[in-house]
Amino acid sequence: MNTAAWRLLLAFAFLIAASPAQALATIYLDGAGGNIVFPAKQTFIDGLGGAKISASTFNGGAGTVSIKLQSAPKGAATRLYYLDFAGFNGQTLKPGKYARSINGGFYVNPKLAFMDVEPAAGQGCAYADGAWFDVLEATILPDNTVLNLAIDFFEPCASSAPLFGAIRINSLRPVPKFGPYAIAGRPQIVDQGWTVRLDGVESSANDGAQPPASMLSYAWKQIAVPVVSLSAATAPNPTFTAPAVPASASGVPLTFRLTVTGPLGLQDTDQVTVTVHNPQDPQTRIYLDSASGEQVGQGQRYYFTEADHTFAVTGYGGGLQITVDTSAWRLAFAPTTGTTFVPGTYTGSRNYLGTSPLMDVDGLGRGCGDTSGSFSIIQVAPPSGSASQGQYAFDFEQYCDALSPPLKGSIRINSAVPLHDGLDQTPVVPEE
């Protein structure tokens, strides 16, 4: 009998033995490749070997889950871990895939799922792209009592090997589950005519590791019209050209299903939606293109849309301040003191208010000590009420010093003005 079968048999035996008021809880952690949080492979069962497992809410949020694992093996010091999970937009966790989840840091974004596994004392996992968790089953009552729960997760770390794990509370599902995990990526918002890349590269084998391509097969299928032609429906990340669509404030959604098959023939599915807009549709989005060696963007491209990011627009020194995901990115622009914004080009900008126009773009804790550059206002239509209800279109070019490469960008708030033609708009996965 293999290891997975033994785990299932053991879990079934404990569930039969448990009283109705006693929850059977199991946690499996595998960071044996050298993970900074848990650099080993071990299964914990509540009440055995000094392990205690309990469930509550994360930061008091309704429908969230915080799992507390206390391990006190005989003759060893007590270790305490927290495994926290939250869904989208304050919704109760429910079965499904939560791709590219975040673990806090500079991000406060209700449109993204949250996952964080860390010790109560010691170093946690620095954020890295590619985290996901799969809720296989969950019953959470209105008073936040967890009746049953089955979550498998994968948490990459920027400074160490990743951590794979599984949580079971009153669940007979294998630990971890049998078969692969299909991860179809996060939703996207694009313009008609753009080249769009679907992203299933985070799909993995049943140990959470990303195996060689030969171990998994991929099959993408579109399940909503208008029909598009995929470059390679059996590739992990095929592309297609966004079709022409009629003008619509909400855009036209295209839905794609990804089926992943493992080496034993077991399958898993996930799906993702790509919303296509007509050029006449007003949209809120920000596109940043950072040259190699540039300080703020670190040589990367970023594309923020309302598919998976939040925006706030407020007045600032006679101009505007736009923040993305509460505090992750901040973009501020203002005319010279005592003047008002009108369409045109503003040269000689600095990152402080005064006799020069103000421009200050920073993100993820990175900023410039002093800036120079210019920005252009293509559209400025302030509303009678909140600044967030206005229409704005800005293009900018910022330098952290006279010798640094530039950070270029296009900002569109409720605007149908196209993005700047000079920006690199080759396929880019929605940025974290």
Image (cartoon, grey):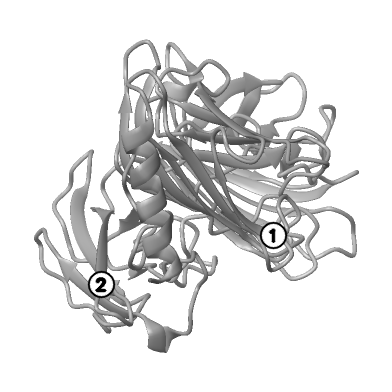
Q: Nearer the viewer, residue 308 or 420?
A: 308
Do we see residue 170 in this rendering?
A: no
Q: Secondary structure at mark 2?
A: loop
Do we see residue 408 in this rendering?
A: yes
Marks 1 and 2 in Cβ contact (< 8 Å): no
Left or right, 82 with respect to 10, comes to right
CA–CA distance in space, label 1 to label 2? 27 Å
Q: Nearer the viewer, residue 418 or 88?
A: 88
Label located before the other in sequence (1 or 2): 1
**Which residue appears at 20% of the width and 57% of the height?**
255
The percent position of residue 134, horizontal first and vertical second, equals: 39, 49
Q: Residues within 10 Å of mark 1 (few under 14, many from 20)?
A: some
Q: What kind of residue is marked 1?
A: Ala
The residue carrying mark 2 is 266
**Which residue appears at 20% of the width and 51% of the height?**
253
Instruction: Give the image quarter of residue 305.
Output: top left
Q: What kind of residue is marked 2?
A: Leu
Q: Is residue 261 above or below residue 371?
A: below
The percent position of residue 372, horizontal first and vertical second, equals: 82, 49
**Which residue appears at 84% of the width and 27% of the height?**
354
The residue carrying mark 1 is 40
